[in-house]
Amino acid sequence: MIKPYSNDQSKKQQVREMFDGIAPTYDFLNRFLSLGIDVSWRKKSLKMLEEYPIHHLLDIATGTGDFALMAADILKQDRIVGLDL
């Protein structure tokens, strides 16, 4: 039986450490493996929001912050908050 988590640390801490380990290469791999589709869906979703008067944006599970950073360029909100572990 494979046990994905050890009992030495909390599950939350282990997940945080796992993501910290892959974060430096995540954006590159995401773009490479998705053939750039990840960028296009972000642009498309933000373009759909342009017609609404958005002053604040909350990016839950922001990861490396790609969506929030692109939103800053496209939507020009007053405030953007990225939330993650």
Image: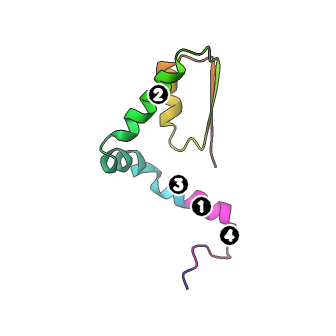
Q: Which mark is residue 15?
A: 1
Residue 62, given in percent of the width and then of the height, sits at: 56, 41
Q: How far apart are the two marked residues, 1 and 3, measured between alpha carbons?
A: 9 Å
Q: Are marks 1 and 3 in contact (CB under 8 Å)?
A: no
The residue mark sitting in front, 4 or 1, is 1
Which residue is labeled 2 in the image?
A: 70
Q: Which mark is residue 20?
A: 3
Point out the tag, 2 or 3, that comes first from the N-terminus.
3
Q: Which mark is residue 50?
A: none
Could you tell me the amino acid type at mark 1?
Val
The residue mark sitting in front, 2 or 4, is 2
Look at 60% across and 57% down and name the residue there: 16
Q: How far apart are the two marked residues, 2 and 4, measured between alpha carbons?
A: 35 Å
Q: Which mark is residue 9?
A: 4
Please tell me whether residue 4 is drawn above or below residue 73 in the rendered image. Answer: below
Look at 47% across and 19% down and name the residue there: 74
Could you tell me the amino acid type at mark 4?
Gln
- Name the residue furthest bottom: 1
Q: Is residue 31 magenta?
A: no
Could you tell me the amino acid type at mark 2?
Met
Q: Are marks 2 and 4 in contact (CB under 8 Å)?
A: no
Q: Are marks 4 and 3 in contact (CB under 8 Å)?
A: no
The residue mark sitting in front, 1 or 3, is 1
Look at the image and give the residue range highlighted in magenta. 3-17
Point out the tag, 2 or 4, that comes first from the N-terminus.
4
